[in-house]
Image (cartoon, coloured by chain):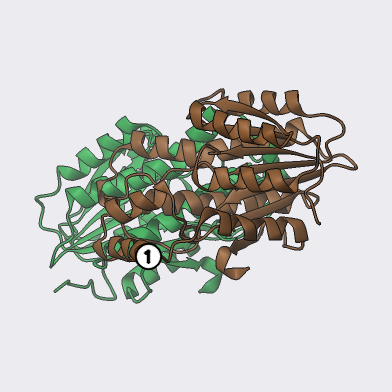
Chain colours: A green, B brown
């Protein structure tokens, strides 16, 4: 029998968040903290040691009385095999802890070049983009599944930070759309293979992040932006209620 | 009889299976003065095909290479430019070459980034870069029809257990070509899913698929004679191209036609 976290906590959770140093990942880290029971472990992954360190300090200060959470930072470039392996190794060190929920949030991503299709003639550039945005997500998720094999008494949740552009084609955004579409499908296969792993492709909507700033600078388009924490809150509610259909694609604007 | 006109046809994975059938069928539907660029890793089979096309009076060049190598797109485009002539009024690129990946295994075994990278390089990146190169080499111009075909699959739309690489790659490709269709309204872009074909790829599917129910379903299709011949599927694809009424960027399955 798989224990389900009650609607108000994530249980004693091993929570891994990639791209945790800024934007949506950082907002999630702050929010998730409120719902982790004592004994939980939070693993934050990003490339920037100083930003991760600062985040960790903020989180430690925000812990409630009696809330004992272990927070680790892994400085890793997930576009490399070493980065993925280091992250899995770090998580593995916690695999003997008594936890009842693994929550993996695949948030780290990049925009890629926003450019007309016919400019993408160089294999290396495209491969490099897909390595970070697609391959690393599969390799990391696989590594975590091996480190914490799903079993009775261990709830498993995986979030794929998706996008409206996983579903809707957007001119000049071929790299981003292609990678997001690949990820959505990848997680649908994961869900079919693992009925005891709940999979959610969550499209967070346009938020006040560096990525949106880059979009504005590169395309001149200014979307109406929502604060990261508002989108994070919607995701959190989905995870806590835990009644979403596995592998569905849910958009911020659907909720 | 409707024809594809005087055309330059570039076909990847042309040595066998669906790609070979496409080459032969297109050869019957193009007008004299057309040219073919046949791409695959296996030179012998390409040269046999080249000879057959020559017997119909068609020029065909063989480009023998591994599509996932960095200079491959460029080499193919260079050959295409060599056989092109101003009389050619139709450029058709068929992105057919593909691989299944290791279908004996499940998501949680794909811990090797190198394996996933290598798969995506061949099945996703190379199609993007080759298509981009061809579009640059043969830019939009009055009097020149341009058509890009992605050989897709039901797997682009539906997840199948133990098929994570193939499903992800096909989903990626469908989206890639949808973006292209949105960007270039004058370009004809077709995501064609050929149905379950009687090919070497199907043989791997029915003998190696890790998920046993799925494997049995594939071998059941083979045993019951439910697999399609490449020719039958190709005929439907040609019908779509000749009628030229499909909406650019759409995913069309053999069974939809």
Asked if one can make out residue A169 in the rendered structure from this viewpoint, the answer is: no
Q: Nearer the viewer, residue B228 or B192?
A: B228
Locate residue B237 relative to residue B105 in the image: left or right: right
Res B216 → quadrant: bottom left
Locate residue A186 relative to residue B162 in the image: left or right: right
Q: Secondary structure at mark 1?
A: helix
Residue that appears at 65% across and 41% down: A114
In which quadrant is the N terminus of chain A drawn?
A: bottom left
Q: Nearer the viewer, residue B18 or B98?
A: B18
Q: Looking at the picture, how far across and down is residue A65, in whole percent?
A: 20, 60
B184 to A37, vertically: above or below: above
Q: Looking at the picture, how far across and down is residue A159, in whole percent?
A: 37, 58
Residue that appears at 49% across and 52% down: B170
Q: Looking at the picture, how far across and down is residue A128, in whole percent?
A: 48, 32
Disc 1 crowd, CA 10 A, few/some/many (<14, 14-19, 20+): some
Question: Residue at label 1?
Answer: B221
Q: Nearer the viewer, residue A39 or B33?
A: B33
A161 to A176, vertically: above or below: below
Residue that appears at 62% across and 39% down: B11
């Amino acid at each position: 029998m798989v224990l389900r976290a009650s609607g108000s906590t994530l249980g004693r959770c091993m929570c891994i968040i990639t791209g945790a140093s800024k934007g949506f990942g950082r907002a999630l880290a702050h929010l998730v903290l409120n719902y982790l029971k004592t004994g939980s472990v939070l693993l934050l992954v990003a490339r920037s040691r100083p930003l991760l360190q600062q985040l960790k300090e903020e989180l430690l200060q925000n812990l409630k009385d009696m809330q004992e959470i272990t927070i680790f930072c892994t400085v890793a470039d997930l576009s490399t095999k070493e980065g993925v392996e280091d992250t899995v190794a770090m998580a593995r060190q916690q695999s003997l802890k008594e936890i009842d929920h693994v929550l993996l949030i695949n948030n780290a991503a990049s925009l890629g070049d926003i450019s007309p299709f016919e400019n993408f003639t160089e294999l290396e550039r495209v491969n490099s983009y897909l390595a970070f945005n697609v391959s690393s997500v599969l390799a990391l998720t696989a590594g975590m599944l091996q480190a914490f094999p799903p079993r009775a008494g261990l709830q498993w949740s995986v979030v794929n930070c998706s996008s409206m552009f996983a579903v809707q084609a957007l001119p000049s955004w071929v790299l981003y759309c292609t990678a997001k579409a690949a990820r959505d499908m990848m997680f649908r296969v994961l869900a079919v293979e693992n009925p005891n792993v709940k999979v959610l492709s969550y499209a967070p909507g346009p938020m006040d992040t560096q990525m949106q700033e880059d979009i504005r600078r590169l395309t001149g388009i200014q979307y109406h932006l929502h604060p990261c924490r508002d989108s994070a809150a919607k995701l959190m509610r989905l995870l806590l209620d835990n009644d979403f259909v596995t592998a569905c694609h849910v958009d911020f604007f659907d909720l | 009889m409707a024809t594809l006109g005087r055309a330059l046809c570039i076909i990847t994975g042309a040595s066998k299976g669906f790609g070979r059938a496409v080459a032969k069928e297109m050869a019957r539907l193009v007008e004299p003065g057309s040219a073919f660029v046949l791409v695959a890793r296996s030179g012998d089979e390409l040269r046999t095909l080249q000879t057959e096309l020559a017997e119909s009076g068609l020029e065909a060049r063989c480009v023998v290479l591994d599509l996932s190598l960095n200079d491959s797109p460029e080499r193919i485009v260079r050959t295409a430019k060599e056989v092109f002539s101003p009389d050619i009024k139709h450029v058709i690129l068929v992105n057919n070459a593909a691989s299944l990946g290791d279908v004996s295994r499940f998501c949680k075994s794909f811990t090797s980034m190198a394996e996933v990278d290598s798969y995506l390089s061949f099945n996703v990146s190379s199609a993007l870069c080759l298509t981009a190169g061809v579009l640059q080499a043969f830019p939009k111009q009055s009097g020149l029809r341009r058509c890009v075909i992605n050989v897709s699959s039901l797997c682009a739309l539906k997840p199948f257990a133990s098929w994570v690489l193939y499903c992800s790659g096909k989903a990626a490709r469908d989206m890639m070509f949808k973006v292209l269709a949105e960007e270039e309204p004058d370009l004809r872009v077709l995501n064609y899913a050929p149905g379950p074909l009687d090919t070497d790829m199907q043989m791997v599917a029915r003998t190696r698929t890790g998920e046993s129910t799925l494997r049995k379903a594939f071998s059941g299709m083979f045993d019951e004679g439910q697999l399609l011949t490449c020719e039958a599927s190709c005929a439907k694809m040609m019908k779509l191209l000749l009628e030229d009424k499909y909406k650019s960027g759409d995913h069309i399955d053999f069974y939809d036609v």
